[in-house]
Amino acid sequence: MTIWTDGLNVLLDRAWVVFSILIPILWGNILFGAALRKIFKTQFTDIEYFSLGMAGWVLPSSLWAALMLAGTFLFGEAATIAVSALAVVVFLFVLFSGKPKRASIWHSLALTALLAVSLVLQLAFLEKTILPLYFDSAEHYRIINYLADTYNLSAIDTPSTAYYHFGFHLWISAISRVFQPGIVNVMLVFGQVMLAILPFSLFFIAKQETQSNAAAFFICLLAGLGWHMPSHLMNWGKYPALFSLVGIHFVLNVGYLIYRNDTFKHRQSALYGLLGLGILISALIHTRSLVVFAFAALSVLLTIWRKTMPAMVQHFLFALVACLILIEIVFIQKSGVLSLLFGAYLRDDIWMIALVAVLMFFSIKFYSELTFFLLASLSLLMLGLFVPVHFPSLGGLTLLDRPYVQMLFYLPLSIFGGLGLAGLHQTLQRFSFHPKLLTRFTTLLIFGLVALNAGLRHHFYPSDCCQIVSRDDLAAFQWMDTTLPSNARILTASTDLYVTSFESANTLAGVDGGVWIAPLISRKTIRMRWDVNFAQPETHDEICAQELDYIYVGGMRESFSVPQLAGRPNGYLEIFALPKAKVYQVIGCE
């Protein structure tokens, strides 16, 4: 009951923030759904249209956010009101211009109840969260603040040359500007709302492929609660990566419709237009989604080519892709950086992996075409971890990094589970001894296993490793903002960042609350490795050479050493102290 109580408390405390985020999503969902109904008429059910809209909302909503920023930048605050009024007018026109649609009251109530349950469960995460987690979040806050405040620009807020997640920051800045809920609140609630609605957009493909509502809902359940991903992304502050999943789900849905051209061949031009828009917006949200789409397109071509081969060759290609995946797993496990890819799945999701492994036999037997596509995509995703690329502003990278691939694994695993359940149903139908009763019992048992696993092993609260800001840090920030000069230069702790095999040793990431000093109180910060030895005179000389004025020490395990700083009173003077936050002034520089 603690999870439900915490989730409801957060919902009540931040009701306006939740409302601010849901309104553009529901607005986009209704507009996109109306456009789809114009194209496909009654070809899909209400639930299928709803599922498509749970990803398709990103198209009209992103257009609204872009108009909001452009209008405000060109014409000032009046544009905010004008664009918002235009959005309301368009919504009312779409709502009342078409023919009344009869929607099943039971379907509507069921979907509303499922959404509410999903939202409450995800919001429990925020009961123990002070600021968005990990070092990435501070950078996202800084960029959103830059976009939201177009009239108070300063050099410290300008996006860097490595900036490439424009879509996420644009959308959050528009929400912050229109509804005024506060950027930190929007970031925190945004992540949990995305986690709540994302699984519903997977219903469509499963229903179309299997014609089974049970299999489609099972995919949604697996995607929402079966794996540590994508919810674990909030511990890493990977908000653009999470947002990119909306675009990826949408492109996969539209791509599936195009692939099944025998069923939807009369709407190909409209579908290609939607596909192009989806790819464009996804690229603006996160450029690495383009790599995912390229790999998916290549997998589709392989799948089509495989269909033209004799049965023996098809079996050989299936085995070949499986062997390639095994080889990639071996190489990944031998890499100190990449081996973390499977660690959390084996630690937290082992029972779900075992369940999907059993169901996968039925997926291969009854849905070999889609199963081969997913296996080919998996092999290419892991291959992307080893393909080097170089950009002048970003340095040496690989096509995909380990956190991004780790995030994406939940998608094929969930679909394997849904396809396998549908295949299992077909197998059980062959039993003459009450096949319907046996099928229902098996379905309830499998659904129950996932729910039980979620209750025992799913992490609904933030990880201790990644919540780098405490209330002591907030007090320290307030004290520094009122006490330290605006041109102060502050040293903060960092560590080496490795998410691919090609980062240089100079790639540093913040490890404690010091990462929020620059975005929150606009003081210049310089990073240094957390294990630097302050007891050595050379370290003090280096700090003086960089003209650093203060040193910030947070309460994390990898923060600077307090005993070392306290052991040199002639070089470092403690001027602020709380158990988990300290500020030292650098003294004794010539």
Image (tube, rainbow, N blue to C red):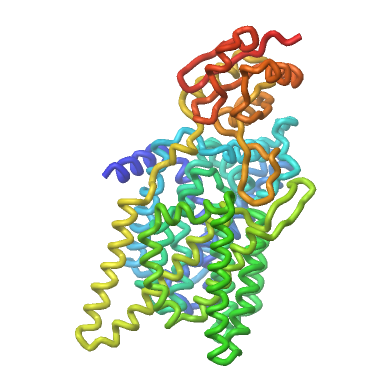
| Residue 388 seen anywhere in this rendered image of the structure | yes
Quadrant where the C terminus is found in the figure: top right
| Residue at the (65%, 26%) spot, across then down | 522
Q: Nearer the viewer, residue 491 or 73?
A: 491
- How many labels were placed on the picture? 0
Residue 219 percent across, percent down from the top left: 41, 66
Q: Quadrant of residue 376?
A: bottom right
Residue 267 percent across, percent down from the top left: 60, 80
Q: Quadrant of residue 274?
A: bottom right
The residue sitting at the bottom extreme is 310
Q: Nearer the viewer, residue 47 or 143?
A: 143
Residue 194 percent across, percent down from the top left: 49, 52
| Residue 266 seen anywhere in this rendered image of the structure | no
Position of residue 56 relative to residue 321, above or below, is above
Q: Is residue 356 left or right of residue 166?
A: left
The residue sitting at the left extreme is 433
| Residue at the (64%, 72%) spot, across then down | 297
Residue 415 percent across, percent down from the top left: 46, 69
| Residue at the (41%, 71%) spot, across then down | 418
Q: Quadrant of residue 564?
A: top right
Q: Nearer the viewer, residue 16 or 416?
A: 416
